[in-house]
Image (spheres, helix red, strand yellow):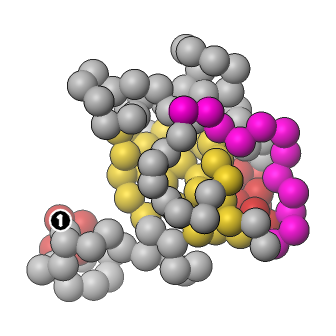
Amino acid sequence: MHLRAAGLVTGSAASALQPLNAAGGIIGVETGNGATPPGEVLQSNGAGTGFTGFMICSSGLSDRVAAAVDRLLDDGIPNTGSIRAQLTATPDPIQTTAMSGSYTDSGTTLVTICKAL
């Protein structure tokens, strides 16, 4: 709502719904797992490797698009770096463990990616 009122994202400033990305998925700001204090999410190798602070997430992306974004802005690996991914057809909740291995690049698997801020 505040981003819309500031003109940074499209849509009605009166809407409480989160903005959508070009793929129709949700874009949102997250803080760890929502606990107080925030617990880790998208860990790569267990505790101490995940995100706990602010991150921006975009859901409903094809694995091909997610891989391209990760390669362009980070290291291209879904469970390391400042961009992490999870396989999911729905955006919530952000999971404790990030997607392991590599992107399949099939163009059909849905992925949520998050960038630590």
Taken as a whole, is the magenta stretch helix, strand or loop? Answer: loop
Left or right: 57 as drawn, with respect to 19: right
Left or right, residue 75 beside residue 86? right
Which residue corresponds to the image point at 71% horizontal and 42% vertical from the top-left? 99
Residue marked by disc 1? 2
> What range of the chain is rendered magenta?
96-107
**Quarter placement of the N terminus:** bottom left
The correct choice, above or below, for 66 with respect to 29 in the image is below
- Above or below 116: residue 18: below
- The image quadrant where one finds the C terminus is top left
The residue drawn where x is 68% and y is 27% is: 44
Q: Amino acid at mark 1?
A: His
Image x and y of residue 42, in percent: 57, 35
Q: Give the residue at the far left of this rendering.
A: 14
Coordinates of residue 74 in the picture (x, y in percent): 69, 44
Left or right side of 11 for 99: right
Q: Residue furthest top?
A: 48
Would you identify the image quadrant in which residue 46 lies? Answer: top right
